[in-house]
Structure formats: structure tokens, C-alpha cells
Amino acid sequence: MQRRSFLTAAGAAGVSLGLAGCEGLVGDGADTPTSTTASTDTPTDTPVDLPSEWASPNMGMWGWTARSVAYAADQLGVEVQLAAIGQGGQTWDRITNWRRFRGFDEWVRNGENRWYLPHAPLVVGAEVTAEDREPTDRERREAWRRAADGAFDDKWRRFAETFADRGFDHTNCILRLSNEFTGGFHKHGTFNTDGEMVVPPADFVETYRRTVEIIRSEMGPVHTVWAPTLGRDVADTKANYPGRDYAVLGVDVYDDGLAYGSPKFAPDGIDYHRALARGNTRNVRRVREFVWNRRVLAGRRQDSPGFGLNDLAEMQSEHDAPVCIPEWGLRWRESGYGGQDNPYFVRKMWEWMNDHEAVFHSYFNHADSAGSVQIAPPSHDIPKARRAFKSTFGSVGAHPMPRMRRR
């Protein structure tokens, strides 16, 4: 496979983001999104190739505890190098409480080349609204405006101090900040439930950057992951990227789509679940290809274009930044809008990650109310998808994590 050259750039900080193994992935942040003030620095770029042995993404797994991640790895017969978990999203106490590490600090210390990938909102839900309801657009805007002005800086300093005290730094921790901020289903989101962007991108970007700088002051040059959802407006989504000096590019991907649950959205009116029940492999394949191409790659929601993996690939090229898939998984929904036991989706995810040299991925190994499918031990009858997972992602040996360097 032809290996891409990522760029390093001469920036103000002379620090190295020591994510061990692959050099020179991150530049100086001169690629500033629209609606924010562009940097006046002129970078001096030197191409640096990924190492030749780096031919596949590092294995990651989302799990509630370190023990559950270790058990899943044993079930699949794989070596998990990166463990992902939510650090809590509604109150500051939850995201700064060391007890919420659930053994991951020990898991990292007790193995070689292990990494912790927690996700936490830049603005906790209680700052948007303390009530158990969806926030108004105004509440979202006001909370993010305060965040951009530094109202929560002391909270993030405490967060970083807590992580540092438990042994986390830039050599073993990557942070996913405000994951799925475009989804509308999180209080901390900058989009509402109708899919409209209601927080100015400038406020999101300023909050993101200032928070990263605070965290780095305590934990060293730790890097973060920027991860929207599929399907929102492409330009609006891209405008919220804080720059390659602050974040690896990512997106959360799940195997769901209207074509699975309703023939009127499927090619030629195919009933996906009837085709599954009757063993009509041709029609099953057609629907799966349709969902992959329209929903996952193109990010389309019904007839509306949206942010998809194709757009992530464009951003990778535009910003010369590394990509990852920090959360992905199968779906088995009661409504029928999930692909269920879908080995095609697993293999296509594998192919895409390798084609775009994703530096790591994390399978969401938890069965939840949204229809996510736990793969180990399996929460649903998914023998074909499990075999596909083990023959692709499970075939990967331990590789060094990529090193993202700022000069």
C-alpha cells in the first residue's frame, strides 16, 4: 500500500507528542476552521512517512471497566492496546473523580504500550441546564459562550491534575473532548435535536483550544480526538475543527440506516429483514452496500447530504492530519434500523481504516438502549460479524502507537 506522508511543522512549542511509534503526524495548527481567527504563523513543513511496519490500525475497545475490556480481549483472542470509556458528562464532580477510572489506570500501568481514551464534554450538562430536559438553543449558546470566555478553566485544571495524579500523561492517554457534539442528543452538544448548529463554531473552537492548553500544562503534550457524528451539515461540522495541532480527526460510526428498517428507503423497495429471514443474500447485500455508500461514506440522512467518512478523508487531506475511528459498532435495533449480524460492515470498516491509515480504532463493546451490539461476549446472535471481526481486526499483532509530533 502506498504510504501517505504526514507533515511536521515548525511551531511555537518545541514539544513532542509522544504517542509511541509513528513520527511527525501533527503540525502547528495553522489550518484554522472558518468562523475563527486564522493563525499568522507560516509553517515550514517537512514530509515524514509512516513507518513501513505500520500497516493496520491499533486495536481499541470501549468498555465500562478495565476488567470488561480484558475479558473481551480474551474472548476474541486479541490484544487490546487502547481502552475507551466515558468519564461522565453531567457534572464536573463526575469527570474529575478518580474513582471513575474503573481500574484503567492500573490496566495501563500493567501492560506494554497501553493507552487510555476517555471521553468528556467540554461543557458539562449541568452548566447548560440543571433540569432533566433538552436544553434550549439559547441555553446551549450561553453555556458555550461562558466556556469560551474561560468560565470553566479551573474545572479543567482540576481534571488534568486528577489525571496526572493517577499516572496519566501524554505517553499513555488520549482525550476525546465533547464527543458527538453534533448529535443533538447530548446536553453538551452544539447542535440541537433538529440537527441545526446553534453554537457559533468560534466559541467551540476557542473552548477546545484553551481547554487543551490547560490540560497540557498539567499532563504534558497530550493529544485529543475530535469526533462528531455522521449526518450533520458538512460545512457546519468542518467549521468546528480546532486544527491539527490540537486534535486527531475522527468520527463515530454505527451500522444503522433507514433502509434497514423501511423498504421505502431501500433500493427497489427491498425488505431487508424479510430478505434476511429468507436467506436472500443478493438483496441483503444490496441493502448493506446501499447503507454503507449513502449513510456511512456520504453521511446522507434520507435525501439530505451530511458529514460522512468521505468528508473525514477530505479533512485528512486538507489538514494533513491523522485520522482515527474512536467509536464504532454494529446495531440491532427494535425499530429495525440496524444491520444486525453484518460482516460486510465490519470488513468495510477494516478496509476504510487501512486505506486511510487510521492510527487507532475503538469498538463500542456495550449493548445499550440505542441498539449497540456487544461483540465480546456477544449480546446478540452475530456469528458472521464476529468471524469477520476476528479475521480482520483480530489478526493485528501489537504495533507501537503512532507518535504525533509538534516541533
Image (cartoon, grey):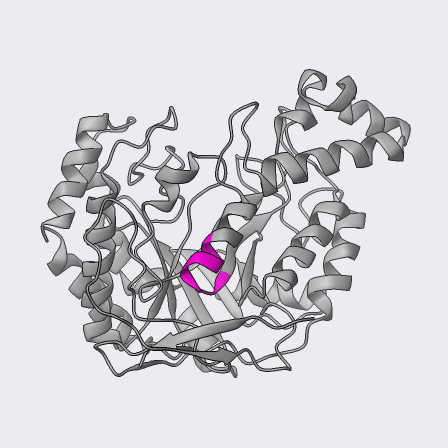
Measured as percent of width and height from the top left, residue 265 is found at 66, 20
Nearest to the observer: residue 266 or residue 73: 266
- Give the residue displayed 32% in from the left and 45% down from the top: 239
Measured as percent of width and height from the top left, residue 387 is found at 79, 56
Q: Is residue 306 magenta?
A: no
42 to the left or right of 253: left
Measured as percent of width and height from the top left, residue 390 is found at 74, 62
The quadrant holding residue 101 is: bottom left
Nearest to the observer: residue 380 or residue 191: 191
303 to the left or right of 242: right
Residue 154 showing in the rendered view:
yes
Residue 130 showing in the rendered view:
no
66 to the left or right of 219: right
Nearest to the observer: residue 253 or residue 117: 253
Q: Is residue 202 above or below residue 138?
A: below
Q: Which residues are magenta?
A: 315-323
- Give the residue displayed 68% in from the left and 64% down from the top: 393
